[in-house]
Amino acid sequence: MPLALLAPQEVTLFVLAAGLAFHLGCAFTMGLDAFLLPFAATYPCVLVAQGRLADHLTHVERATIAGAAACAITGFAFFHLGKERRLA
């Protein structure tokens, strides 16, 4: 979701729709009545934040921030995946 803040509005809407479908599926599968509402309640905030960031950041700045975030997420994932393999 954090990278959706830096994407164009069409991509952000697609990511939010996919997130809504995912959380709806989880709520239905697990039988959780109050599971969907807290996640869906944050989506308007994401849209507002994405719009404000789009107004103030250039494409180069957004791409730089997105690249740095993607590197951090990838490094974190590889670190923890490697840790699990060493333990097994």
Image (cartoon, grey):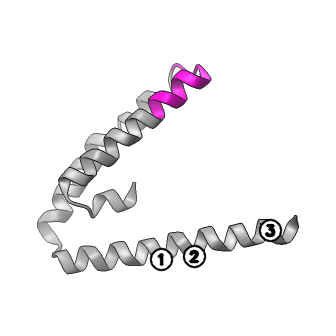
Is 84 drawn above or below residue 27 in the view shown? below
Where 5 sits versus 71, above or below?
above
Task: Name the residue tied to disc 2.
Answer: 75
Q: Position of residue 36 (x, y in %)?
A: 45, 29
- The overriding secondary structure of the stretch rendered in magenta is helix
On whether residue 26 falls in the magenta region, the answer is yes
Q: Which secondary structure, mark 3? A: helix
The quadrant of the picture occupied by the N terminus is bottom left
Q: What amino acid does circle 3 point to?
A: Arg
Distance of mark 2 from mark 1, alpha carbons? 6 Å
Label 1 near label 2: C-beta < 8 Å?
yes
Residue 6 in the figure: left or right of residue 35: left
| Labelled pair 2, 3 in contact (Cβ < 8 Å) | no
Of residue 28 and residue 40, the one placed in the foreground of this image is 28
Question: Residue 53 at what x, y percent from top left?
Answer: 20, 64
Count every numbered label the image shows and give the total.
3
Give the residue pinned by disc 1: 71
**Sequence-wise first label, 1 or 3:** 1
Q: Earlier in the sequence, mark 2 or mark 3?
A: 2
10 left or right, relative to 29: left
Image location of residue 80, percent across then percent down: 69, 68
Question: What's the residue at 77%, 71% (across, down)?
Answer: 83
The disc placed on residue 61 is none
The magenta segment is: 23-33
Position of 42 relative to 33 (above/below): below
Residue, disc 3: 85
The amino acid sitting under disc 1 is: Cys
Q: Callout 2, which amino acid?
A: Gly
